[in-house]
Image (cartoon, rainbow, N blue to C red):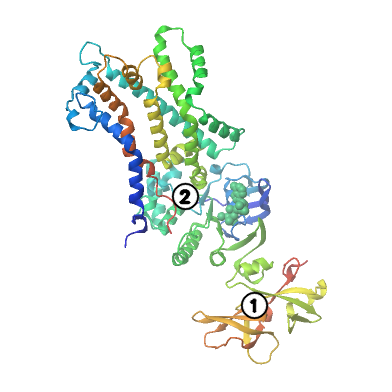
């Protein structure tokens, strides 16, 4: 007999089949995109004859060529780097603020705590697009006079604004993670002479590593994928705006855009392939008899 | 190695919102004393322990360590070691690091930390486990690590919150003896919270019985066992618990349903003085005999009997819905429905006032 946890459930195959069926169009879409990036022409049907393999597209992408002919070049490495800055910036700010705020909301009594939690939920319900007019107004008001500062400022602003969109959800998530940790861990540290901030850093954070990882990854993906905020505020291009700008250009070679698109999707794919394990892996703490 | 510390609690009250978890607690714990705090679940034991540690601030009242008022002192400056009920070992740190943690916070030198951790680990027989993570340990080992972590900083006061309740019964007995020995060797003032009366009786110098945030009685194990102040105390200590039967006083006699027995010697004067007519008649299962012939005693019918090896517990129906339990020697044979007489040991009988449930000898 098998262990209880490993015994397969009776309807498992049925559930798996249903999941595959529902996600088939998506999987197919991604599959065709990735395949096209290695093909001379776009693959729009499943006939094998349309697939003429080449890695030309990828070479061109990394050389920054947008069309096979002509001399239009863009520095795709720089664009990828820009994307990375935005993604890491958003991720960093979201992680820092949500671990601090999540801890205080979970563990500390202060004036306006309830109100703050309510506002967080409401803020989360607002779509980013709905806020963009106000966010833009503020952008204009704080825009630096010095032209040499403008590009830097636009990075700074887009990271901050995009992070702000992620923060309500992340703070809630973190609060939830902190809520699961018994008070005794914290009390134990305090009795042994640790300050609140030390307890937070040395005891609480290590205990919620999976949560921190989740929030950091969501923040990263949000920054990496964002189109609207980046397009509105950032003077430079990221992968998202690059693809968006070129997808309609008449000179663009579609399989090449497919390669750029695959590059753009890469973190998301890696994330979903690896993150499940990371998120589920907590500490098997607690008490054994 | 450790300083003299006695603890005095003065009118400690702790409220959570409208709920009073501790109600005017007065208690003195002597230096080097092993005090057990005994009460059912939810009686406020942990709350009192946390208040002494400084995790909770009392709503009113004062706490003294020796003569020093520590009511407002933060936990880290009280120099207490606390073992939590769930032990609260840090799962991300190895055993060594867990035990060393309080010393690291004190900024002790590496050498000193190394030395002290090994010393205390050796004392608790866990020195071979220092490289493991807590989840790689058995329950008993985890518990030792928790105690080691509390002891490593050489606290003035050791506070233990049901440290054995997560161990299996056999291990509990073993650790119980060891812990008692350790406490005496270290000579450290200890407060031990438990809901297990046997544990309290076996380990403590004195026991404080707490119910619904109030301390009912404080005394050494003999005192609280043989001279319980309240019905609750009498019923909580001993297993199976004391028998209580409603009874009426009629002159020099006590009527218990159809039976009549004379008032125990030690109560004659008190009953006369207090002019009490209704009492709760209490006696422990070990303090009575089952007689078959005619004798002065409480008449009843054998309801059931459970052999326990060297003795048996006989349940006797005194009335249709009133049962008492009495121990009988192993050889004796009973049959269901048999008519018997229970003869309580007169000296061990305790009479309680029916209304206040207080033992009569404690009336002023
Ligand atoms: N932080 C708290 N907030 C509100 N009520 C509490 C809190 N801690 C304990 N209580 C209540 O106080 C009572 C005593 O709790 P506790 O001291 O944990 O009991 P024990 O340790 O004796 O089982 C319980 O009724 C419990 O629900
Ligand atoms: Mg408790």
State how many labels appear.
2
Q: In the image, is the residue at mark 2 within 8 Å of ligand 2 by its beta carbon?
A: no
Above or below: residue B329 compared with residue B116: below
Q: Is residue B206 left or right of residue B229?
A: left
Count residues near mark 1 (Cα–Cα under 10 Å), then give few for <14, some for 14-19, many for 20+: some
- Left or right relative to B123: residue A114: right
Residue A282, given in percent of the width and then of the height, sits at 39, 45
Query: Furthest-top residue in view?
Result: A146
Residue B172, compared with residue A118, is above or below; it is below
**Callout 1: CB less than 8 Å from ligand 1:** no
Residue beneath the point at 54% across and 36% down: A105
Task: Determine whether the residue tagged by mark 2 lies in a helix, strand or loop.
Answer: loop
Q: Is residue B65 visible?
A: no
Residue B142, position as x, y percentages in the image: 42, 55
- Residue of label 2: B88
Q: Chain of mark 1?
A: B
Judged by depth in the image, the label closer to the viewer, 1 or 2, is 1
Q: Quadrant of the C terminus of chain A?
A: bottom left
Relative depth, front residue between B359 and B21: B21
């Amino acid at each position: 007999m098998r262990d209880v946890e490993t015994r397969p459930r009776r309807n498992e195959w049925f559930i798996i089949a249903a999941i595959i069926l529902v996600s088939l169009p998506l999987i197919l879409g991604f599959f065709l995109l990735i395949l096209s990036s290695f093909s001379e022409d776009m693959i729009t049907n499943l006939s094998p004859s349309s697939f003429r393999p080449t890695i030309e597209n990828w070479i061109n992408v990394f050389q920054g060529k947008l069309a096979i002919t002509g001399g239009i070049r863009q520095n795709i490495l720089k664009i990828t780097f820009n994307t990375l800055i935005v993604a890491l910036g958003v991720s960093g700010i979201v992680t820092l603020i949500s671990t601090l705020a999540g801890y205080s909301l979970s563990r500390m009594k202060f004036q306006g705590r309830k109100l703050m939690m309510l506002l967080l939920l409401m803020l989360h319900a607002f779509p980013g697009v709905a806020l963009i007019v106000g966010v833009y107004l503020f952008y204009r008001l704080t825009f630096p006079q010095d032209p040499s500062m403008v590009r830097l400022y636009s990075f700074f602003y887009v990271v901050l604004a995009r992070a702000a969109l992620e923060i309500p959800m992340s703070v809630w998530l973190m609060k939830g993670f902190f809520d699961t940790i018994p008070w005794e861990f914290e009390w134990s540290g305090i009795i042994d002479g640790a300050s609140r901030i030390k307890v937070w850093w040395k005891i609480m954070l290590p205990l919620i590593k999976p949560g921190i990882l989740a929030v950091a990854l969501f923040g990263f993906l949000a920054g990496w994928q964002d189109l609207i905020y980046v397009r509105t505020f950032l003077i430079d291009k990221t992968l998202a705006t690059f693809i968006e700008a070129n997808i309609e250009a008449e000179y663009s070679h579609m399989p090449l855009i497919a390669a750029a698109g695959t590059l753009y999707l890469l973190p998301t794919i890696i994330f979903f392939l690896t993150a499940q394990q990371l998120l589920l892996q907590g500490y098997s703490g607690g008490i054994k008899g | 190695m450790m300083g003299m510390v006695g603890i005095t609690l003065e009118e400690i009250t702790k409220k959570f919102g409208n709920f009073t978890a501790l109600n005017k607690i007065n208690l003195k714990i002597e230096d080097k004393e092993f005090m057990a705090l005994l009460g059912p679940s939810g009686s406020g034991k942990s709350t009192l322990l946390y208040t002494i540690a400084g995790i909770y601030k009392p709503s009113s009242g004062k706490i003294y360590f020796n003569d020093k008022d520590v009511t407002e002192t933060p936990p880290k400056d009280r120099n207490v070691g606390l073992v939590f009920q769930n032990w609260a070992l840090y799962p991300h740190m190895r055993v060594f690091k867990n035990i060393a943690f309080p010393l690291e916070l004190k900024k002790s030198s590496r050498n000193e930390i190394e030395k002290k951790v090994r010393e205390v680990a050796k004392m608790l027989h866990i020195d071979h486990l220092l490289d493991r993570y807590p989840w790689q340990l058995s329950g008993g080992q985890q518990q030792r690590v928790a105690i080691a972590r509390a002891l490593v900083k050489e606290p003035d006061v050791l506070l233990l919150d049901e440290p054995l309740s997560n161990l299996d019964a056999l291990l509990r007995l073993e650790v119980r003896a060891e812990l008692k020995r350790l406490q005496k060797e270290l000579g450290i003032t200890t407060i031990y919270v438990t809901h297990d009366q046997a544990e309290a009786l076996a380990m403590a110098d004195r026991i404080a019985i707490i119910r619904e945030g109030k301390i009912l009685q404080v005394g050494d194990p003999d005192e609280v066992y043989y001279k319980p102040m309240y019905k609750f105390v009498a019923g909580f200590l001993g297993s199976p618990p004391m028998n209580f039967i409603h009874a009426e006083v009629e002159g020099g006699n006590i009527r218990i349903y159809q039976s009549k027995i004379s008032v125990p010697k030690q109560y004659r004067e008190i009953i006369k003085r207090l002019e009490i007519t209704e009492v709760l008649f209490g006696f422990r299962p070990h303090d009575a005999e089952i007689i078959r012939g005619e004798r002065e005693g409480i008449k009843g019918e054998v309801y059931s009997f459970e052999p326990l090896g060297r003795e048996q517990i006989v349940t006797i129906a005194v009335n249709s819905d009133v049962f008492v339990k009495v121990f009988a020697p192993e050889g004796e044979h009973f049959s269901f429905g048999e008519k018997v007489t229970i003869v309580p040991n007169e000296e061990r009988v305790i009479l309680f006032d029916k209304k206040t449930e207080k033992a009569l000898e404690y009336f002023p």
